[in-house]
Amino acid sequence: MNIVEREVLRPVPAAPTQMLQVAGVAHSQPEGMSFDVILDIVRRRFWIILSCSLLATAGALGYMAIVPAPYTAVATLAIDTSRFQLFGQGAGLGERAIDSAAAVESQLEIIRSENIALSVIESLRLADDPEFAHRFTVGRLFGRTNDSKDARTANALRAFENSLTVKRLGMAFIIEISFGANNPQRAAEIANAIAEAYIQDQLEARYGATRQGSKWLEGRLDELREKVAAAQKAVLDYKAQHNIVDAGQGRLTSDQQVAELNTQLTVARARAQEVRARLDRVNRILREDSNDAIIGAGGEIIDNNPLITKLRAQYLEAASRQSEWSKSYGGNHAAAVNLRNTMHAIGLQIRSELKRTKEAYENDVAVATENERNLEARLQQAVMQSQATSEDQVPLRDLEATAQTYKTLYENFLRRYTEAVEQQSFPHTEARIITKASPPSQRNYRRMIKFVALIPFAGLILGCGIAGLREFLDNGIRTASQVETILNTDCLALVPARDSVQSGHANPVQMSVIDTSPDVSPGSAKKLADLHIIDQPFSAFTESIRSVKLAIDVNGDRVIGVTSSVPDEGKSTIAIALAQLIARVGARVILVDLDWHNPSLSRGITQTHECNVLHVLGNQNSLQQAILKDPATNLDYLPADTKLRIANTSEILASSLTRNLFERLRQTYDYIVVDLPPLAPIVDVRATTHLVDSYLLVVEWGRTSPAVAQHALSRAPYVREKLLGAILNKVDMKQLELYDRNRFAYYNEKAFARYGYTS
């Protein structure tokens, strides 16, 4: 099994937790939806939010300029909720008061109903009024019109509903009917017509319901009267047939007798247990061998016996005196012997009294046991009798329940019938007009202003929604805290992007071809053109690379591998810039290109040099023949083969030949910077863990997916173990402020600009 297979099968180790304190890098806490985060999102998507709000405002103002404000007439109704009653539902038909608030809301919906609207439209001929009948429609826009009566009525109904406003005034039982029209007299006429139509509708509905209810109740009363009489007669006949006698309150005499016997049996059992417990206590005391044990035994039996209590007191007094005589004159003294004899005699008397008590308790136990047996026999007999009666009682209960149900229904229907007859003779409604509508003197702009005022907020909400969607779809890594949180590693530097980045390359440092033709001597070989590290040593880019070198020095690594998650993230730029910076300070450094699938670094630096790292591994050329040197920085470079495509590159990287090559390089150079392929597409990086001391992961700002980066590291556990940190590359410093204001200030505030660390 080669090293690549072994690494794939190894478990993923825990992510490193040690932080680089010397370089001033610390892990950040995950970003939550704090006020600062929301503010940053708003600042990033400000123009989207502003554009939506302005467009909505312009549309609202245009609507206000085109559509004139109507004249609004107002009529008010008073609702008497004390007369609201619920006409029973189902079998109960019980009367109950309706909740007053719900009652008023129900009346509001009735006034808004299509039935009231059609009544007013028909009475005032609104279907022939151009203001209502000829409304603007999409069909009219394309020349399709329908002047039938039904179409004009439908248009008038839609216009009527849009112009009508019905509301409750506070918590009062007052309903305000507002109607808007272009003509003030027409508005007042329609508002009053709505109030009158509502009252007329209530009168007709109540009279019709009362009349139909009276007829139905009358028929039901006759039917229920017959059922009540039949049900009560069935109950009486059943009781007489089965000799069932009530004991009152719905109970039978047999059930009452069982309950009484059960109570007496419970008391008898408790009494028997009590006397048995006393007898057991006396027996335990009598089983004691010594008088001292009997005297020491307490309890209710001894404490409640006056004779035993008196004898025990004498015994204790004699024992006390005997103890004193024994201490003073010895245990064989005549007085001590007499006292012990006295104690023995008292003990015999106590035992005799206990035996007498035992005999009394035995009699009590016998009496209690016999009483318990008698009660059990009587209870068993009563239960058998009750069971026989209960079997007959089951049908009786059904008959009584049926009779009671019919009786309750009859009483409820009789009460409702009486009320219905009274209401039919004098119909009334709960609503009355308290203020009629009068023609308004000026137009009502309130509703239109509210509408126009809400539109910009709707546009603002739409803009925020679009901004949130754009933010959600923005899945790139943009801040150092995201790098540290998502990848669980240190963010060593934020490398700014430059205008010199060419399409198709992720390198802010331009590279020219090193001329190695035979007619050019090594001393006059062209240097890398526009070396940013050398030409601008105080730029933000150079300072970022310098912080990476500091992290390498603090960790004490010599072989540094530079990789990324996916291609085109700028890893080759970081590798060559890091190598140039190390070479610039006088250290011996070599840059090795091991990205053999896509050797863009070798293609950018040399095109005519025939020797490469594969020739060295195959012993076709010596190491000295393959190495190129940049005279401007003294940087040595070991290129890759730019023409030949190799399939088993991971096997070559994992071989002993490559290991021996790197051992030779370690003996010659202080630093070895290795340009490695990306982690996600191929496995070559996982085959270099025996060659590299630490890895640098290059993450492209705003482009690298967190899921891809996490997946790439999870598939390379030993690379993660040696991961020194990540570099956030190609950062747009103008946009960085919108994502990470603290890091942006590091590069742009005046306190840092005085040292030259600005782009």
Image: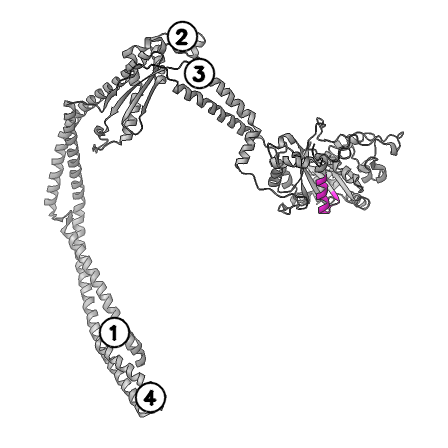
- The Cα atoms of the two marked residues, 1 and 2, are separated by 114 Å
Q: Image quarter for residue 110?
A: top left
The CA distance from mark 2 to mark 3 is: 26 Å
Q: Amino acid at mark 3?
A: Met
Whole-angstrom CA distance, mark 3 to mark 1, is 104 Å
Query: Left or right: 73 with respect to 479?
Result: left
Q: Is residue 375 visible?
A: yes
Mark 4 residue crowding within 10 angstroms, few (<14) / some (14–19) / many (20+): some
**Which residue is depicted at the point 33% across and 88% down?**
325
Side of 13 relative to 137 (left or right): right
Name the quadrant containing residue 15: top right
Mark 3 and mark 4: span between their CA atoms? Answer: 123 Å
Question: Along the line of sight, which residue is nearer the eye, 625 or 238?
Answer: 625
Q: Which residues fall within the magenta stretch? A: 546-559
Closest to the camera, between mark 2 and mark 4, is 4
Between discs 2 and 4, the one toward the N terminus: 2
Judge whether residue 622 can be spotted in this image.
Answer: no
Q: Nearer the viewer, residue 481 or 650?
A: 481
Q: Quadrant of the N terminus?
A: top right
Above or below 98: residue 336: below
Helix, strand or loop for disc 1: helix
Of the residues under marks 2 and 3, which one precedes in the sequence? Answer: 3
Which dot marks residue 325?
4
Residue at 15% across / 47% down in the picture? 249
Confirm whether the magenta stretch covers residue 550.
yes
Circle 2 sits in a helix, a strand or a loop, which is it?
loop
- Work out whether mark 1 precedes mark 4 in sequence or the reverse, and give the earlier one: 1
